[in-house]
Amino acid sequence: MDVINILNSLAKSRPIFYSEADFQHAFAWAAKSLYMCEPRLEVRMIHTSSRASLDLLLNLPGEKIGFEFKYKTSPISAAIYGEVFSLLNQGALDIFRYDCIKDISRLENAIGSGQISRGYFILLTNEPAVWSRPIREGHADDEFKLHENEILGGVRTWGPAAGPGTRKNREDTLTLTGEYQCHWSPFSLIQGEKFGTFNCLVIEVSTPSFSMHSSNKTSRPITRLSKPRANSGRYSKLTEFLSQTAENRIELTFDQVREIVGSLPASAYNHSAYWSNHPSHPPAVAWLSAGWKQSKLDFLGQRIWLERITDHPTHSTKPPQ
């Protein structure tokens, strides 16, 4: 099943939707028409005490695919194919972004429980602030941003600027096992409207691996939506660095780690859990894959010590040639 093909087909007949539910139903119908699959909406998640549900479950021969949808709108009034659409500005962006990351986490959990074999997070919006890089940092939702080229992964939490009203019912820190890069694609254009450009973000979620080589992205198209592409993952650079290190114990500053892998999320400086050996965190995936572990952390001094795992299959008493 080709998700991008479904969206391209849908954009031709439905360039705009009344609501998120309308978007979900239209996608499910298009998928059924193209692939003769059995769609099920609002499917309760298994192995969880919460009442969380998957927006859509598609049953195909040999696999079950889960979907989470988001539809964020800015004001627009237009007549399309004889239908009149009058969309309003929806909710706060910070809360919306948090819910998007939570949707991706929900798909990862559904894969981990065996309920689905893979999943897709699909976001459609005509709000430019969602896909555009912010001019300034220091916002409450910095770690939930979804702009072009943003990399999602690891621990995600509210910034200090988040007030009680923002955090209400969204207090939980979110953790993504995989690493995903945001690449937006054009979906449709409603001529003559200030917010007539609809862009789409598709993130494929597959079985997490200790190797970031299996991370998933969507590629930026030239004209239409294009298929997801594989990504080696920036944390693989840390794995490579450690694999080539002759010593059995090294000390790195946070800035040195940043020089190796690129920019670090705010949680790297705000939460010591980011540097733990938990295999759901991208840095831990990198050093565990190379046969190393975190042995000491000076969080205030922004330093970390790593040492070889002596019984790891990659361990060797001989330095690399």
Image (cartoon, rainbow, N blue to C red):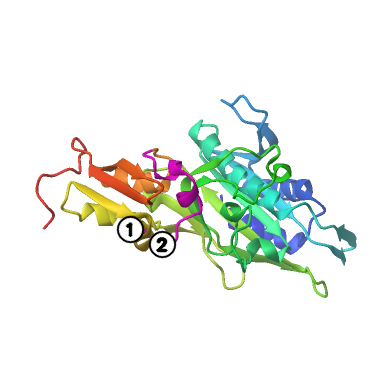
Let me know if residue 76 is in the magenta part: no
Q: Which residue is mark 1?
A: 237
Q: Position of residue 49 (x, y in %)?
A: 61, 24
Three-letter amino acid code at disc 2? Gly
Q: Would you say 264 lies left or right of 3 here? A: left
Q: Position of residue 260 (x, y in %)?
A: 34, 61
Residue 80 visible to the viewer: no
| Vertical relation: 175 (above or below) 229 | above
Towards the viewer: 304 or 224: 304
Q: Position of residue 32 (x, y in %)?
A: 67, 45
At 90% from the left and 60% from the top, the residue drawn is: 84
Three-letter amino acid code at disc 1? Lys
Q: Residues within 10 Å of mark 2 (few under 14, many from 20)?
A: few
Residue 158 visible to the viewer: yes
Q: Earlier in the sequence, mark 1 or mark 2?
A: 1
Towards the viewer: 45 or 50: 50
Q: Position of residue 23 (x, y in %)?
A: 74, 51
Let me know if residue 262 is in the magenta part: yes
Please report the bounds of the magenta region as a residue range. 261-277
Point out the residue furthest to the front here: 300
Number of the front mark, 1 or 2: 2
Q: Quadrant of the C terminus?
A: bottom left
At 41% from the left and 48% from the top, the residue drawn is: 300
Q: Residues within 10 Å of mark 1 (few under 14, many from 20)?
A: some
At 16% from the left and 50% from the top, the residue drawn is: 247
Q: Does the residue at mark 1 contact the one at mark 2 (Cβ under 8 Å)?
A: yes
Q: Would you say 151 lies left or right of 192 here? A: left
At 83% from the left and 62% from the top, the residue drawn is: 75
Q: Would you say 286 lies left or right of 169 here? A: left
Q: Which residue is mark 2?
A: 262
